[in-house]
Image (tube, helix red, strand yellow):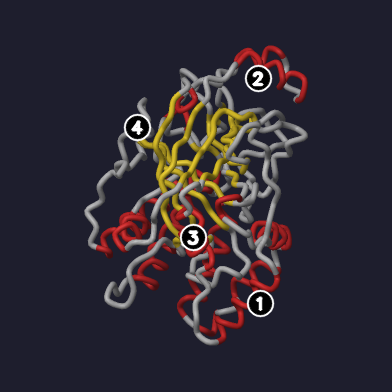
Amino acid sequence: MNLFTEYPEANEQKYCDRTVKLVQQQMELLYGDASKAPAKRDTHAKTHGCVQGILEIFDFDQAAIKAELAQKTVLTEAQLEAISLKQGLLTQGKQYPVWIRFANGSTQVKNDYEADARSMSVKVMGVEGIRLPESHETQTQDIITQNADIFFIKSIKDYYGFFASVVKSSKSPLFKLLPLLWLLIHPKQRSALKTVTSRVPKSLLTEHYWSGSASALGLNPDFAPDQPGLTPVSYPAVVKFGFAPVSSQKPYNKLPVESRTESNITQAKTLAKEGKRDNYYREQLISALAQPDAEYCWDFGIQLQTTPEMSIDDVTVPWLETKSPFITVGRLTVKHQKINFESQCDFCENLRFAPWNGLAVHRPVGALNRLRSIVYPIVGNFRHQKRGVNYQEPTVK
């Protein structure tokens, strides 16, 4: 394995084709009859809300960052010299308006006290540059993150196997336990899933988020877009993104990890038994941002792959910060706003995010990202068709 290189997976195209058919089946099973329920996403189905914010990219000192990386990583001077950090979204100091969607990770709309991943999808507006052909918008960069630094599916083959069990369980109650059975015979993936879904955060506005999967930072002059998935493909650099919660005032200290209290969860479970839905996170977002002095911040960082053992293709492998610390390159800020009205809820449900929506120099890399380039358009197009949406690229209100 070489640094900054993604590798094809055995029988990749076969399992991609099979997964596409499963996704089409699942969306039809869940939302084929639009009169029963509006079509939602196949994963991260429960939306808590969409909020506006500002992503400030710093005019950072590239030489100073490289000097720090030389001290803290095993990258050689020659390797660091060849890397250009100031590319694409990071080219210059600038403020970008953003839309942010907060959601739960599950395929189903569940109570918020239940174990699940929590996601923060950031749509950066007004981003100029050469775009990925897969982009569904013209001047945005999507950064999709969740509150865990790994994913629980190792490969495209594993994704197909697990998702096949999920689809079968949707078809009949007789197959309800198939996803659990799949996890039982794949203990590594089961352990990773437990890690990803273990926390019940106190607030999504003070949670730590990671991209989990990697993206390129630049393309080589001889890059051929039809080669990933067929042959090993190398990039000038590969990074992951992260948003670390910090205080809203200087010196922007890191915030501690906080979870919902046991008494709060117990109360929610009691109400659920009475048929009342636990929408804690939406209610908390509305309440927190309604405060006139509300202000929430995250340091926006990139984490450079520094050794081949920090796998690009296997996203169950964490990239340890002891091997490569996150480099702060910007700050995301969300301030006071009102989000509890019907039109914004509809806007949020219809908004489309995809890791492949953005600049070519930030090309998503790795096996599961290649699968996502196929799956996300299927889900997005199906959802909008069933909801009767003529999708328009969002603007800042």
Residue beneath label 3, please?
Answer: 287
- Sequence-wise first label, 1 or 4: 4
**Please, which residue is most extreme toward the front here?**
292
Which of labels 1 and 4 is toward the front?
1
Residue beneath label 4, please?
Answer: 126
The quadrant of the image that shows the N terminus is: top right
> Residue, x 44% and y 64% (percent of image)?
22
Task: Using the image as rendered, state which of residue 34 and residue 231 is in the foreground.
Answer: 34
Q: How busy is the neighbourhood of tag 4: few (under 14 within 10 Å), some, or many (20 plus)?
A: some
Horizontal side, residue 5 vs residue 262: left or right: left
Kindly identify which numbered label has been placed on residue 266: 1
Which of labels 3 and 2 is toward the front?
3
The quadrant of the image that shows the C terminus is: top left
Residue 178 location (% of width, % of height): 59, 75
Q: Quadrant of residue 34?
A: bottom left
Residue type of the residue flagged with mark 1: Thr
Residue type of the residue flagged with mark 4: Gly
Residue 224 visible within the image: no
Labels 1 and 2 touching (C-beta < 8 A) = no
Q: How busy is the neighbourhood of tag 1: few (under 14 within 10 Å), some, or many (20 plus)?
A: few
> Residue, x 52% and y 61% (percent of image)?
284
Labels 3 and 2 touching (C-beta < 8 A) = no
- Sequence-wise first label, 3 or 2: 2
Q: Is residue 151 above or below residue 273?
A: above
Residue 291 location (% of width, % of height): 48, 53
